Image (cartoon, coloured by chain):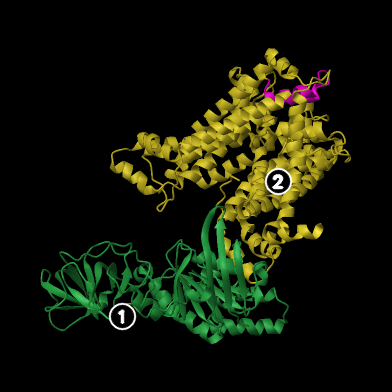
Amino acid sequence: MKNENKKPVQKQKRNYDSWLIVTIILLVFYGFFMLYPMFALVKQSFTDKETGVVSMVNYMEFFNNKSNVLALQHSFSVSFWVTVFSLLLGVPLAYFTTCYKIRGSKLIRILIILSSMSPPFVGAFSWVVFAGNNGILTRFMEDTFGINMPSIYGFNGIVLVMTLGFLSLVYLYVSGALKNVDNSLIEASANLGTSGIRRFMKVIIPLIMPTILASALMVFMRAFADFGTPVFIGKGYQVFTVLIYDQYSGEMSQNKAYAAALSVIAIIITTIVFLVQKWANTKFEFTMNALHPVEQKKAKPLQSFLMHFYCYFITFLAFLPQMYVLYSSFQKTSESGLVFKKGYSLNSYKYVLEAYSDTIWNTIKIAVSALLLVVLVSVVCAYLVVRRRNIFNQTLDIMTMMPYIIPGSVVGVALIVTFNKSVLGLPVMTGGPFIMIIALIIRRSPYTIRSSVAILQQIPRTIEEASISLGASKAKTFFTVTLPMMLNGVVSGAILSWVSIITELSTAIYLFTYRTRTMTISVYELVTKGSYGYASAMASILTVFTVISLVLYMVVTKGEGSGTA
Amino acid sequence: MSVGIKINHAVKAYGDNVVIPDLSLEVQDGEFFTLLGPSGCGKTTLLRMIAGFNSIEGGDFYFGDKRINDLDPAKRNIGMVFQNYAIFPHLTVEKNVQFGLKNRKISKEDMERDTKQFMDLMHITEYKDRMPERLSGGQQQRVALARALVIKPDVLLMDEPLSNLDAKLRVEMRTVIKQIQREVGITNVYVTHDQEEAMSVSDRIAVMNLGEIQHIGKPKDIYQRPANLFVASFIGRTNLVNAKLVMKDGQAHLCFADGYSLVMDNILPEEMHDQDVIVAVRPEEVVINNEEGIHGKVDDSVFLGLNTHYYILSDQVHCIHTEDKDDDRFELIQESMIDEIIPNGSEVRLKIKKEKVNVFTADGSKNIVKGVKNDKYLYGND
């Protein structure tokens, strides 16, 4: 019997090479750690928690409760306005710095990249310290002018903080696209009598529309999924990520089925947004390749002054909170860390390095392991998707991209409700660094896979064939030819991944235990306790990590950093 | 050790789309064999089947006596040169050349000796520590060739190796390739769409179209006695003219529309009957004179030094349009004379060199002139 089966396998040998095993391992991995939890989540959302039968009760309950619907509306309106404002502020910033001579535009770029890399909740927290009830700005305005500052908490605060955080994404994407606009198009439009604002609206904007849409989607998704900002600065303004967290962890009203239903609704919304953006993108599909990149022009004095002012002011605003956090980390605090005192000291650092040194080590351990695995998974996936196109690898491609539209909170909830018990007879996986690393791999891979795919597509296939024809095995070819050629791009992508891994909060908040607290979680804890000085010190250490990573990134990419991976 | 290649009834299909329906050929040991044809004719596909980069849907491929259908490409012991050279950009010239040797179990001394020998042969030793990005296209091609040859492959496969070079380098490199192939004495399968390149390097050429072999033969045979109309018009320039073959007194007369006729004494016996034919007249197979031939008028002329090209319009005898030639003027080449170029508008007559022209059946599928040598049928093609 066995011998009879052998023949056809022999004939199709080429399809059953060693890469198939890799594909199967990855499919099993994603199936087990992503599809299965998502499926469990959906199932739980349709299960009556009392009777255990299939029902719509969780959804009914959700939509019957006004405050829940309101939280969803809040999330939606926050994301919408953040997207609008980020575009309104980010696109002109990119346009001015790319198309006009702005002094210090290199520095602006670096500061903006830095602010794009800093965790969103650091922005939120620092605005609280800066302009919250007891913030320096609030007190200064009150004491000096007797002006009552409008509250930084709630909707306004969330939109302000997120906009200043995310406009950097718009800036980076759009300035990249503007560099691809051919100067002759601008000259042609001037030749045809269009200039100034009209040209900007009629020529420039349509040309970079695909990029604008892509960055809008990115901003919307991030704003929708952000947990840190609303939790720090939202106060009574409930959004859905916070609602899920409350439902999940609230001691009084813990309801996991309910949190599951909420997660499903969130995925549906992000999926719709994603599809709308895809559809919109097909309306603006064309490729550009600039033979003559845009030349930076000198503007008229008044215009030039206004542009300079605008660029400096926005950059200043985007960067201000981090500066202030750094400043307050050196302020003296009371013994409990709750109150700032006059004078400066390193006490806050001393305290966090003593009391929270384990979180720094945890962060490094978890992030390094996650990063290595993210890079490995991404490079291998990219290779399979680009070079070994078949039905399995296309499935893998879709599977790995799914987390792109699943908010981090949902990934967290799904993993915790699935793996906090024994699955398939395996030991319980939650409660240690393992599940946190898994979560990071699933969440980060879509981005690194995309950038690896882009690199791989630029490497001609014949180079690998040359290696094989020279007698190298497929594995040897991959490690001695393909991988070294991808390395530069992969390393720069990895550094960006590293930054977002160490600043991750929304998934980790569900998965951490006392033993596996990371730096971001300790900042969250310290802020919740009101120890702003200690929180500032911890946040500053995190910022230093980020800056070092950024410098590394600039070295690797030779200053070309587009920061979009 | 160089070996011959034998292909029996090869089939290549992508799903239901059959690219090569049934193809057989043999390449002799040490032969420079070229696959020539327009893009999409299946020549590169066939080459990649030999190399092992394309799957084989049917038929048998042999290197010598060894069937290689299921042999891993890494174990076929082939040297391959690619259109874009496929030089490893992260390795120096020397490391590139050594790459294949490192996959074989040979001593370090042998490796260094062989690397040096082939770098010397290709005149690239002076660049051995350079990175490929700092080499010109011609130098990169030399590296690619050295890299492919140093492993002493059974066969050398080349996929349009010169098409990325500029015109002057292309001519220079094809001489280099030909010389090296002779020196090393290796079986070489070479793919190109450039018929001039094919003729200048090959021992034999297989002209392909739509996945089928049209004609296998020596460059001279293919040029002078093409097997069918496709080969005639793909190789070199040709004027194609409709005519009639009329039998009179047991002799075949080739009659043109304006009454000019020729007695042909080299028509195949089985084709000696009245029929419509297409005559393929190459530009150099016509002589301008005033006494006999097709009536025409000089429309234009181009002086190119050694030769002068004339374009002749005829009232009744029109050239058939092809992909290569889309006007109905007669093109002809004459050695430039010291006297005046014939002025435009002059009435002339075109005398055809009847021993040189080829005559095809009306559907173009067969050359009915004696002397066609087509090896295609030796290998079991229909």
Q: Amino acid at mark 2?
A: Phe
The circle on residue B266 is: 1
Question: Which label lies toward us, 2 or 1?
Answer: 1
Chain on which label 2 sits: A
Rounded to the nearest angstrom, the CA distance separating label 2 from label 1 is 88 Å
| Residue B294 part of the magenta-drawn span | no
Q: Which secondary structure dominates the residues rendered in magenta?
A: helix
**Chain letter of disc 1?**
B
Judging by colour alone, the chain drawn in green in this rendered image is B
Task: Let me know if marks 2 and 1 both belong to one chain.
Answer: no
Nearest to the observer: residue B5 or residue A192: B5
Q: Position of residue B42 (x, y in %)?
A: 49, 63
Q: Residue furthest bottom?
A: B183
Which chain is depicted yellow? A
Judged left or right of residue A188, residue B185 is: right
The magenta-colored residue range is A238-260
The spot of residue A198 in percent (x, y) is 35, 34
